Image: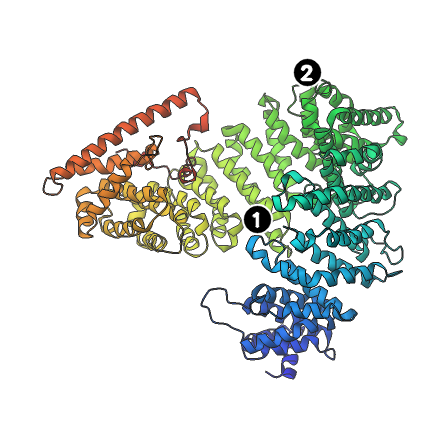
Amino acid sequence: MDLPSLAAVLQAALSPNPEERKAAEESLNQFQYTPQHLVRLLQIVVNANLDLAVRQVASINFKNFVAKNWSPNEPGEPQKISTSDKDVVRDNILTFITQVPPLLRVQLGECLKTIIQADYPEQWPGLLHWIKRNLQMQDQQVYGALYVLRILSRKYEFKSDEERTPVYLIVEETFPYLLSIFNKLIQIVNPPLEVADLIKLICKIFWSSIYLEVPKQLFDPTIFNAWMVLFLNILERGVPAEGQPSDPELRKSWGWWKVKKWTVHILNRLYTRFGDTKLQKPESKAFAQMFQKNYAGKILECHLRLLNIVRTGEYLPDRVINLILQYLSSSISRNSMYQLLLPQLDILLFEIIFPLMCFNDNDQKLWNEDPHEYVRKGYDIIEDLYSPRTAAMDFVSELVRKRGKGNLQKFIQFIVEIFRRYDEASPEFKPYRQKDGALLAIGALCDKLKQTEPYKSELERMLVQHVFPEFGSHVGHLRAKAAWVAGQYSHINFSDQNNFHRALHCVVAGLRDLELPVRVDSVFALRLFVEACRDLNEIRPILPQLLDEFFKLMNEVENEDLVFTLETIVDKFGEEMAPYAIGLCQNLSAAFWKCIQTSEADDEGDDPGALAAVGCLRAISTILESVSRLPHLFVQIEPTLLPIMKRMLTTDGQDVFEEVLEIVSYMTFFSPTISLEMWSLWPLMMEALGDWAIDFFENILVPLDNYISRGTSHFLTCKDPDYQQNLWNALSAIMSDRNMEDGDIEPAPKLIEVVFQNCKGQVDQWVEPYLRITIDRLRRTEKLYLKCLLVQVIADVLYYNPSLSLVTLQKLGVATEVFNLWFQMLQQVKKNGKHVHFRREHDKKVCCLGLTSLMVLSVDQLPGEALARVCKATLELLVLYKDQVAESQKKDDGNDDDMDGFQTDEEDDDDDDDQVGFKSWNMDSHLIS
């Protein structure tokens, strides 16, 4: 397709006519792999005579094709882009980056990122030379070089050790020029916004280069000082007043504030990496000492001056405030830095930090105009990372934790004074926002105050006097804060239980508040009160109403923390939840589908609905656990959960696969029988296992065990689908896969054991195939635990049919080899006398059953000498088993609640962590016959 034709097709891709768009897309797909197609797309992107929309479509097609096809996904896969086309793209894209508008530059930048990741330095050795040459030229070329260097440096940002080696050459070749450019830019009087863009790129390049390790070239004090002078200059100088956007969202993204943010970011990173000389490697110690001596204090002083503009009401972006407070928090524990902080600590604490903790105009605006967004921001972990308020709370917490003497008393006196002024003021003059900040501070310091006298003894009185009254406040944010603070202190020992009851009832009443944020904070507080509640009679009478209010709120807000409260209630009331179980599962299922729809509609993929969906499934599991002794309920719940299980066991459910498998495990274990509808899930799990879900094999094992052990007849007799053949196909593929690690296939031998333990006398045809793949894997297995599992498969097959199994082993020519290995493993001990293999009671039991089954064979099948070895090994095993059972019983008697009945072995390591609850592979019951 020539250039004009391609441009016409791209124009058609923008057509409002769906048929034309579809035809254009098909044409693009048809010609995408033809020679020079990629080059022509790039030519259209840079052709200024064409319509910008057409160029944008070309840039997106170019980006997507490069991302998908520039380098093969698998070793040995043929190249889809010719070498000549790649050369043309590499030779031209660097120049084109600076010639296109920002809208298109973003797309080309993404392409460049892909190409650099794949080709530098091996296939693109000239890239660094191009950057170096262009750094010495005029403005446009310098910008292009910085833009490309930023992408190149980012490739190594998180690389360590030998993977990081190319960084040293990049720094050596380019940093002298960067320093020179930076110096010139700093000296420009009344610099335009374009200068900020250039400085920002230099900052980002520096950040990526020092993120994990400072390159050795910067260890030179003269060179490092030259950089630090520039960064401190940026930190201290004010940003230009002209040109600042009035819109707060645009303002924080304005170029000069971005420069300020990246400068603070870099200085913080250097401080956290090199602020403590004790933590340094020997080769970095001298540099760390130099940094601590010459720069850490200067940065602190600059930060304090910058932060002071907040005190005077001037603008400072939230992220900059957050980063500065992080630096100050890190300085508290270091004596020299704390001494610098001390003279200004009161001003910092009471005139800057505390006001940041108070409810403000932005909060009120969001509360009034978008309460859902107010709630989301308040409970979003990512928002917390960048929030000045969170950083302020962290500073106060760190201060009273590391420098509590004097500071805690001083801060609490300040809070008490706010409480006093609030109480004494008439309603129209009450400092409501300061009271909100004071309550936030009290809640944030709860751990410290609960442990420290005299505050510990006064907490109940403080709640009664200063928190409880706000439950009835006409100010919504104070009602919400009262609920939150009450929840933080719900676990204290109330001298008057009426105060606990009063707080609980106020929190419950908050579930019906007219303001959404109050209802949400009340639900979260309720969880803490339920955990702390010693007498469930306080909650039992109102449980139905609680659940109603709870689900009303879930219909309004998607938040996983909401589900935590429900889980806590279900866990606390156990079987008492039975009357509500069906309704709860129906409500949670409806909430789950709503969360999924929200998540699918969210293009950015960061919607809280995804987390809330996981929470809904986890809560369903908690409900199923609570009614596990009422199997009839599972039959009634199944129709509600089946659609979720069916869809989420496909690729649609990859994000919730583990949670769905847990639900399937409950349903197949506790239902009176496994229904045909539940059996329809088997093929979905096996398809997932063979395709993409090998990492979930241990989780898939659990329901498969339940299907075979509880639905044995259907497993054996059904031929459409043929479950036996289906299982064999999956297990043989996994066991014979030489690329699969030993640890990844451990569930496979466990499943083979399930078959032979549950299907005695009915699967003779599978004895030889399963023995063959077991022995093949045993011969090349290195991991001790997997070796034990594979030998236990042989023991199980012997127990299943000793005569047939022995004949099969002899037919395969491995009988002597297998028994010699088995006896050797049984005898192997560590220096401390403990056995290396078969350490669990279950392992010993399986081996005993396998060996004792041989004793019934005739002499011509098992000669006397072999029988003697078998008897000796069995007796030794039985003694070990008996001793271990006695030891376990002794431990259980000594600690009734130890591990909730889990078996444990001393010196357990990662090889032995396969025992998990009823849902785990735990088949001792199958061995009792």
Dividing the picture into quadrants, the one containing residue 484 is top right
The kind of residue on which mark 1 rests is Trp
Q: Does any portion of residue 700 appear in the rendered image?
A: yes
Q: In which quarter of the image is the N terminus?
A: bottom right
Per the image, the residue denoted by label 1 is 593
Dividing the picture into quadrants, the one containing residue 918 is top left
Q: Does any portion of residue 903 appear in the rendered image?
A: no
Per the image, the residue denoted by label 2 is 496
The kind of residue on which mark 2 rests is Asp
Q: Position of residue 14 (x, y in %)?
A: 67, 73
Point 56% across, 42% down: residue = 616
Q: In this view, does 268 lie above or below 490?
A: below
Dividing the picture into quadrants, the one containing residue 145 is bottom right
Circle 1 — which element? helix
Q: Position of residue 664 (x, y in %)?
A: 44, 44
Query: In this orientation, which residue lies closer to the viewer: 512 or 317?
Result: 317
Pointers 2 and 1 in contact (C-beta within 8 Å):
no
Q: In this view, does 247 lie above or below 864?
A: below
Q: In this view, does 58 lie to the left or right of 203?
A: left
State which tag comes first along the sequence, 2 or 1: 2
